Image (cartoon, rainbow, N blue to C red):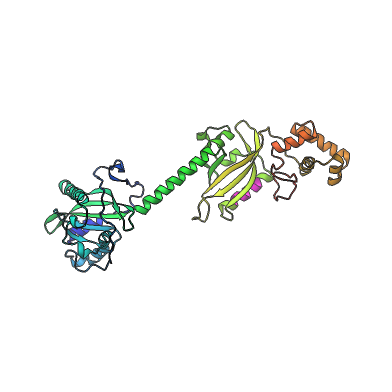
Amino acid sequence: MGDPSLKTLLENLPVFWREADEPWQTGEGEADGPLRTGESDDTGDPGGSRHAPDPRQQGAGLAIPSGYAAFADLVDLAPAAAFIRDRHGRYLWANHAYAHLYGTVPQQLVGRYIEDFDAPAEADRFRALDQQILTRGTPVRHTLRYVRQDGTTGRAVGHRFPVREQSRTCIAGIYVDITDHVRATAQRQEAEENLSALRDHSGLPCALLSANGRVIEASVAAAELFHLGLTDLVGRRAHTLLAPGPGPDLEQLHRRWNSLIARRTRRVETTAVLVDTHGLQRRAELHLTTIGHSASRARHVWAVITHQSLAHEAHPPLTAAQIRILSLLAQGSSNSDIAASLKLSRQTLDYHLSRLRHLLGAATRPALVARAYVLGILAPHAWPPRSATAAHPLSTV
């Protein structure tokens, strides 16, 4: 291989890190879709399913200038498959990766023709592409389909381009296998589509949040919960959706959020008071789960609301004694039993009950209990009744 050919071959190496922002156009035959200017597409079976030992090439290539021996070894042993053919389809040089596609070694390729390794239809297609390169005189980037050694269909992407070799114009090509990349991309796309379908059709309010608490994605149910359009919800800071004011709820939520982002835990179940655009509040049970494991800090968190109370006007926070009274009422305790349990006088208990009826807008004991549940003050799935914000399942406040 001469100096100009070697230089051209190296310059046309398919460099993924340089072209990472440009999606590969892959597919079968004309189904690849539009390619960029100066590109063409080809399908065929350059590899077949044959396999043979792959000893180091010795003397099969063209003459290498001594000053370029290191570069020749680089191309010869590179994982990208490369070849040089003359205008008649005869192989002048091939590296190990290219020979391996045919289950042979470079020595067995050099001096032989395309038809010796490819089926007639594929050979005609490759010859037509070679002729296109010779006619245009410019490189062509394209993708092709081939049969891998395990019998599965593979995808490769690369360039074919003209080179000068021994005072004649020849065709060189260099390709990298992107089968695993294409498969992983398709699997990721399928997973994202499944997640989107689950998000949009489950009916659960859910949102994908960034580490700084900004809404990246959200379900329609989440937007409806806050009486917002979906486009208005995406991009909002999550703290604007929480009821304002300091309190144990927010402090606990912040601690658990920081624990998630620092990856001290992967999943958290907690509660929070949400507020919609009309100013109505509701208590909600939140399931927060981090995504991915690669970074030392979590970048995204899925938030799912599994239960929510009835929307209501904001009311003053209840004291621990008032919540305890409501839990004992829900348990069926009489006034005298509640007073004895909390060591209160009957007059003090009557005052608390009167205050609760006023705060919750309930005239009777059963109405107080019902309002305590629909407003999210008492946990809906707990017995004996307890506060919805209790830190431990057995805690009553």
**Residue at horizontal 64%, vertical 46%?**
270
User: Foreground: 72 or 156?
Assistant: 156
**Residue at horizontal 71%, vertical 40%?**
377
Does the rendering let one see residue 173? yes
* 157 horizontally vs 291: left or right: left
Question: What stretch of residues is rendered in magenta?
Answer: 250-258
Please tell me whether residue 76 is drawn above or below residue 320 in the rendered image: below
User: Foreground: 316 or 291?
Assistant: 291
Please identify the dominant SS of the magenta region: helix
* 318 horizontally vs 84: left or right: right
* 263 horizontally vs 325: left or right: left
**Residue at horizontal 50%, vertical 34%?**
231
Image location of residue 328, percent across then percent down: 79, 42
Image location of residue 113, percent across then percent down: 17, 57
Quarter of the figure with residue 345: top right
**Does 351 appear in magenta?**
no
- Split into 4 quadrants, where in the image is the N terminus? bottom left
Quarter of the figure with residue 354: top right
Image location of residue 149, percent across then percent down: 31, 58
**Does 253 appear in magenta?**
yes
Total count of labels:
0
* 376 horizontally vs 164: left or right: right
